[in-house]
Each structure stands twice: as structure tokens, then as C-alpha cells.
Image (spheres, grey):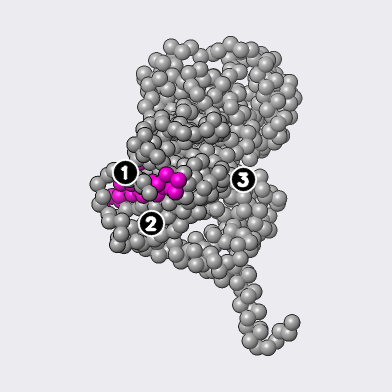
Amino acid sequence: MVPREPSILFDPARCVGCVACSQVCPTKAIRVAAGCAVVKPDLCIDCDACIRACRYDAVQARLSTPADLARFKYKVAIPSMTLYAQFGRDIHPSQVLHGLTRLGFDRAYDMSWMNEMVAGAIDATFSEAGGPWPKISVTCPAIVRLVQVRYPDLLDNLVQIETPRELAAKVLRRRVAAEQQIQPQDIGIFFITPCTAIMNSIVAPVGLEQSNLDGAFAISEICGPLLKAMKLGGAEERDDQISRAGIRWATSGGELMGMRNTNTMSVHSLRDVEYVFDHLEAGKFQSVDLIEAYICPDGCISGGLTIEGRYAAGRNLQHIGRQLGTQSLVKEEKVRSLMREHFFDFEEEIKARTVRPVAQDLRRAIALERERQDLLARLPKKDCGACGAPDCATLVEDTLRDEAIIDDCIFLRLARCEEAAAKRGEVSR
Amino acid sequence: MNESRWSTGEPRVPWEGAEILYSESFQIVGDDFEHGGEAAAKIKAMLKQFGLDTAVIRRLSIANFEAEMNVIMYAREAEMQLQVLPTAVRVILSDRGQGIPDIAQALQEGYSTATPQMRQRGFGAGLGLPNIKRNTDEFEIVSTPGVGTTLRYTIHLQG
């Protein structure tokens, strides 16, 4: 398997070496060494928790640059539905799409209709799909990674349907190539993303060999220039092919609203997802057909690379949806015929990415477990993070992997110093 | 004492005298719904550390969860002991409680003595003991009404 690049970088000029990021990291992927945080890419699930926790703006998402954009003759933007929610209640998606064409893109396409298509396809598969149940939605790439890294038993529960953003890019590349009479590889298709997880799903795709997208720009970076561009007007003509059901996908529960035949459950925020996945592993929630899971607290509108707060964004989106009307843009027969052509299928199986265990052999593993318990008993359990690992248990883990020493613990060192001093008779209490 | 005994699965590993690589005990308290499932979760985390096959861990976790909730719902207290052997993992769960008067009946799917309150919490579907049976390779129940029940179940490791 290709080694994974980190999706975030710590700026050493800004990072002060505090432990705010390492302590919120759900997979214990961050260590603080020599005054700067570093991330272990194989553990990182791109949840953006560190970006939210950093008080010094030192965590940078790895995203596309203007140079990446310049490589292509024809530049296309596909915004996340979350982008529509960043500018108050009274905008129309057409204004956002038009604004993007003033920022260096030749065209910007809405993908809400593809959300509606995929919802239809998921709904339709349930009548034929076999177990295991419940199915878990794959829209959030951080969820897919969490399953690969921590819950490999649930891999077979993942919905076997490609994400709307990938499918939209695939369709649009064909369409643009035909319309503009240019080679497909000369078209650069960029996602406007609310999170680092989607960027990383483009760099290191799962379920397909190569992403249909060429890169991504952060909503947080593009918002300022886009607002100025939108004020210039020029979007009087309104696209009536924007799906109200589709734009709901930016909020938690949105993906489930279009489901007619299924018994669903919406889970969001990492802790709740862990709670539900732990129970799934124990065989619970068998009566649920589909779980929509998002790593962010409120779905994509609460992504780490957004500007508008999630409550305001949710309200904005609701209002924008009302302007769009309730018509469905997707015909069931069209979805079914595309399903027969395997349009929605993954190209590759999604495989586990479990972190290698310290020991392969059972006896050795048990000996290590005893060592782990002994080492942990020596530590203060303050989980202060001063050693560089986020908590005492992780310092023990790193020690067993020869990546740290137990004396990195400042409390152990202090005790040792006091002991030595007492021996020399220099300390009088 | 009218002790009754029931068992299934071909015993491959002797209950006494087998080499035990690791053992750990967990206390479970009746009516303690707040901590329900914690022993099963701790055992699961432990076995993951040991690098055991995920299918083995899943089956044992299901059995453990059912057994643990049974104690919480019906018994006063219990000790759940995990034993890791070179070729198997097994659990011995001894409780002090009301016992099971008719084991054959309790093993029928859908049979339950759960109260409406338990059912409100989502338990009491009568799948507890059948679920343990389904997920283990060896399973033995010894019960004395009014005294308590001991469950012993084993899952074989492959190879």
C-alpha cells in the first residue's frame, strides 16, 4: 500500500508546542517534539479536530495552489453544498457559481442533482442488498478512514456506491470535453471543500484508483474573494436545475431525507460515531438499514475549513432551499438504468488500513501487554502531554515501539532528581 | 441442591490444567446499567492489543455483551474471567443470583423473563443465551435456582 502523506502540516514558525491539538486527536496521531507538533500520517483520519483546537493558526491543510490550477487549459470548480451556506440567507446558488468564474475558473457546476441521484441509488439498492446490516454511508471520507483504521470489521457495512462529488466530476469531465472540444486531461476539476478529509480523498483515493477530481481549494480561503466577486453581479439568470433535496446533504440528516424505503439513523461528531461503531461491532443496531455518519459535529457545514458558524450555515441553507422549490430533478428509471450500467459502483475494494500491532505472535503480545500495564503503573496518569505524547497510555505505546522512552515523563524525571538530591543530602524539607 | 447442567460444542480444550497465557477478572454488579457493557468493551480492547483474529474478537464480544447484560438484569453480582490459552479464548462467568430454573427453555429464541422496564431499555428480546450459543464453539451452563449461574464459553483460535 502506498505510504500516506499527511493531510495537515504544522507551521514551525507559528506552533508554540502546546498540546491542544495532540490532546483532541481521536486517533492519538500527534506528537509534540522540540516545540513543534508532528502528525503520524498512518494514524491520521483527517477529522480536522486539530485545526479547530489550534489557538495559533499553526495547523495548515494541504490543499491545491494557484500553480496546480494553472496546469490545466480549462478550469472547472465544483463547490461543496456548504459553500452556498456561507453568504447569508438571501443568495441563490447561481450567484455563487457565477462568482467562481471570476476567480480563475472557466466554469463552475452545481452538483446537488448528483446528490439526489446517489440518494435514489442507495435507496434502490436496499431492496437487493445482502447483509451485513446496517449499511454505513461513505460520503464523509474521514468516516471511511476511521473504519479502515479502527473498525475494519465494519468494512463490509460500507455502502457500495461512489460519492456524489466523484461521480459528478466523472460526468462533467466527459461533458466539458465534448462541449469545449478539448482533451479530458486538459480539464482541471477542483472541489471547493469544507474539510481536509475531502482533499485527502482526492490525493489518496479509496474505492477507486485515481480520483476524478484534480484537487481542492478551501472554502475558508475562497470566501473573501468570492464575496467580492459576487457583489459585481452578473448572475441574473438563475439555474433552475438545482436540487433542494441535494443541497441538504451539507447538513446532518440531509442524506437520509430522500430515503423512502429505509430505516435510518444519523450520527455525527466523532465521539458519537465511536459510540455507535463500538455497538455495531458488538452486534447492536441490527434493525437499522442505513447509518449516515459524519465526523464533524453537524455534517459538512461544520467542516474545519468553513467560515460561517454551523448554526447560521444550517439556517442559511434551509432558506436557500425554500427558494428552490420542491421539484425532484431525478427520475427513478434513470437511476435504475445507470445502476444496471454500474455507473455508481466503486472501482476497487475498500481495504483495511490497520496500524501494525507491536507483536505478531500471541505469547509475545501478551508479554508486551504485561509490560504495558507495568509501565503504565509507573506513570502519573495526569495525561498532561508534556512528554510529547498526548497521554500516559500513548507514551507507554511509543516506548514499546521504541519511539520514546518512559523517562520522557517529566514526573518520573522530577522524582529521579529529587531522589538523587536527597541522596546527596542537599534537600532539607 | 437441584443443580442443572447443559452444554454444547465438542470440548477441545480441557477446563482444568490447560496452559493459561493470560487471565483477568472483571466485576459486574446487578442493576448497574450505567456501566453495562464495560467489561465486554475492556476485553475487546485487550484482545485487539493481542492481535487476535477480528472474527474471534467479534464473536467473543457479542457473547460477552449478552452475558454481561444478563448479569446486570437478573443477578446480584458476578465475576467475569477472561482466559487466553494458546489455542482458544474462554470466559468463565459466575454469578450470584436467582439462577435459571429451566435452561432448555431459556435457550429458546424469543423466550424472555424480562420486565416491561427492561424491554423499554431495548433488552429482553429473548436472544441473550441463544446469541452466546451461536457465537461460541463450546458453551456450558451450570445453574442452581436461588444460588446462581455459571457460564463457561470458548472460542477456538484458528491454526
> Dividing the image into 4 quarters, which one contains the C terminus of chain A?
bottom right
Q: Which mark is residue B6?
A: 1
Which residue is nearer to you in this view: A47 or A343? A47
Chain under callout 1 = B
Q: CA distance from mark 3 to mark 2?
A: 38 Å
Q: Main secondary structure of the magenta part?
A: strand
Q: Amino acid at mark 3?
A: Ala
Q: Amino acid at mark 1?
A: Trp
Position of B5 with respect to A392 (left or right) is left
Residue indicated by mark 3: A49
Magenta segment range? B135-159
* As drawn, A241 above or below B91: above
Q: Is residue B136 magenta?
A: yes
* Callout 3: SS: helix
* Callout 2: SS: strand
Q: Amino acid at mark 2?
A: Gln
Residue A256: x and y in percent read 54, 24
Q: Residue at x 46, y 20 (%)?
A: A123
Q: CA distance from mark 2 to mark 1?
A: 21 Å
Q: CA distance from mark 3 to mark 1?
A: 51 Å
Residue indicated by mark 2: B83
Position of A313 with respect to B11 (left or right) is right
Graded by Cα atoms within 10 Å as few (under 14), some (14 to 19) or many (20 or more), the crowding at tag 3 reads many
Which callout, 3 or 1, points to the residue nearer the camera?
A: 1
Which residue is nearer to you in this view: A254 or A262? A262
Query: Do dots 3 and 1 share one subunit?
Result: no
